[in-house]
Image: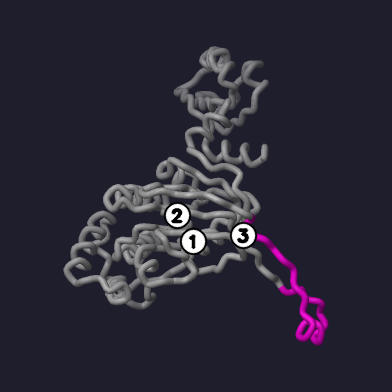
Amino acid sequence: MITVKNLYKTYQTPLRTGNFITDTFNRRYKSHTAVQGISFSIGENELVGFIGPNGAGKTTTLKMLAGILFPTSGTIDILGFTPFDKETAFLKQIGFVMGQKNQLIWDLPPTDTFSVNKEIYEIPEAEYRKRLGELTDMLNAATFLNQPVKTLSLGQRMKCELLSSLLHAPKILFLDEPTIGLDIFAQSSIRKFIKEYQQEYRATIILTSHYMQDVQQLADRVILLDAGSIIYDDTLEKLMQSQSQTKCVTITMTGTNPDLPAIVRKFEHEYMYPQLRVYVPKKRLAEVLGALVELDYLDVTVENEPIEDIIKKFYQQK
């Protein structure tokens, strides 16, 4: 479905000297390489998470895959097309949703934007009505589709953004921060929809997100980018197994000033009443638990390290 080989993107930024003549007639430029020789392939019905800090090259890569940006060098093949040629047959098979960009018409109801997209993508009337009904039910969006966009909540707008981008049933879907700024209920709803849509329509999806819960719950495979280069491309499970050598023990205390056992103080820990959290090497877990249960407590939980900590540790090692 998607094949990328040795892809580069370099931006030219003009240098400012403060001299009008020089800046106008003898302008010099500084080069910044946002994507540096990345290669990967993605198959049908895969959902791949793109992870990386700000400036890692995630959005730049998605824009090149969608044909919005022209690569400096390298090749991209999506469904047999070169994206920047922007052939109609290619554009009808992709969808792009950006959490920080709005495609809906602000003063009109979302249904008006849907009607415009129906004509742009030349969707037959019967097919349009059927798919609109299916997506509306999946997103639980029927109650607000006829309200002006400016009156909708952020979560409702994101549901309409997704609906608008999926009316033509794209085979490839690019999701750039689809849950950014949403509350935990809206995030959960969007995640549930993305998973259901992929299963229903067998779409290939690339997802970027700074919320690791999005990636953990949706993507089996992750691609980690740093400074425009790929530093990891494999399953999320393998990454977690290779990096997580620690268990997180959380104990809910009854007292405000617990006398921590000496063994607990040896390891990284944090205490914010009423919870004490201790990060323990797996091989010392039984020993630490034995000391903790001697304290006055209400509850004890043992979990793997948060995925955010695992990703952070991996980047620090690299």
The spot of residue 213 in percent (x, y) is 46, 43
Please check the rendered image and state whether residue 33 is part of the magenta-colored stretch, yes or no: yes
Mark closest to the chain's N terminus, 1 or 3: 3
In front of the other: 301 or 235: 235
Foreground disc of the pair 2, 1: 2
Residue at the far front in the pictured view: 80
Q: Which residue is mark 1?
A: 65
Mark closest to the chain's N terminus, 2 or 1: 2
- Residues tagged 1 and 3 counted as in contact (Cβ below 8 A): no
Q: Residue at x 59, y 23 (%)?
A: 280
Which structural element holds mark 3?
A: strand
Would you place residue 275 above or below residue 151 in this image? Answer: above
Q: Is residue 127 left or right of residue 187?
A: left
Q: Which residue is mark 2?
A: 2
Which structural element holds mark 1?
A: helix
Which structural element holds mark 2?
A: strand
Mark closest to the chain's N terminus, 3 or 2: 2
Q: Residue at x 57, y 42 (%)?
A: 232
- Three-letter code, disc 1: Leu
Q: Residues within 10 Å of mark 1 (few under 14, many from 20)?
A: many
- Residues tagged 2 and 1 counted as in contact (Cβ below 8 A): yes
Give the magenta part as a residue range. 14-36
The spot of residue 177 in percent (x, y) is 47, 56
Please check the rendered image and state whether residue 163 is part of the magenta-colored stretch, yes or no: no
Quadrant where the C terminus lies? Answer: top right
- Three-letter code, disc 3: Tyr
Q: Is residue 126 left or right of residue 136?
A: left
Q: Is residue 292 left or right of residue 217?
A: right
**Quadrant of residue 111 in the image?**
bottom left
Q: Which residue is mark 3?
A: 8
